[in-house]
Image: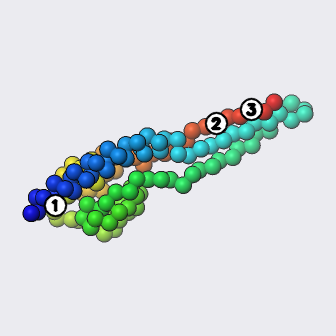
Amino acid sequence: MDSEHWISRLAAAKRFYAAQLGHIDDMAGMGMEEVDMDMEDDGEMDMEMEMQLEEARWPEVACPYCYEDYDLGSLCVHLEEDHPYEPHPAPCPICSEKITRDMLNHITMHHGYLFKVSLSFSCTCIC
């Protein structure tokens, strides 16, 4: 009975991870920074920088201990505050690996790339 629970959780986590791979690829261009360059009459270049950061859309994952849904940033805060010393092993909500100690360390060390947001630059020159 207990093993059926873990098998179903593991299968759900694998399906979720596979579905989220598409979202992670889209997150690289999440922040947009636009640079507009205008030429003035005297030949000087007036550079107006407009930065538009869209609200981060992180994939939601379930806490492996209490099964509440959080985005990745909130999950790390939640694990640090509410589950700093969990005595029983749990599957990683991202890769489904069985973690026996320090889930927060595993997520930050093995899945830290999910927290990096790269800005893409687009430059428009109006002459």
* Among the 4 quarters of the image, the one containing residue 49: top right
The quadrant the N terminus occupies is bottom left
Q: Residue at x 56, y 46 (%)?
A: 31
Quarter of the image with the C terminus in it: top right
**Viewer-proximal residue among 15 and 79:** 15
N-terminal-most mark, 3 or 1: 1
Q: CA distance from mark 2 to mark 1?
A: 48 Å
Q: Residue furthest right?
A: 41
Q: Secondary structure at mark 2?
A: strand
* Label 1: how many Cα within 10 Å (few below 14, some 14–19, many 20+): few
Residue picked out by circle 1? 5
Residue sitting at 21 percent across and 56 percent down?
9
Do the CB atoms of the residues marked 2 and 1 lie less than 8 Å apart?
no
The answer to whether the residues at label 3 and label 1 have Cβ atoms under 8 Å apart is no
Which residue: 26% across, 48% down? 14
Q: Amino acid at mark 2?
A: Ser
Q: Toward the viewer: 68 or 114?
A: 68
Q: Which residue is mark 3?
A: 125
The earlier-in-sequence mark between 2 and 1 is 1
- Which amino acid lies under the numbered mark 3 shown in the image of this protein? Cys
44 lies left or right of 105: right
Q: Is residue 76 visible?
A: no
Q: Could one spot residue 4 in this view of the protein?
A: yes
The amino acid at mark 1 is: His
Residue named by callout 2:
122
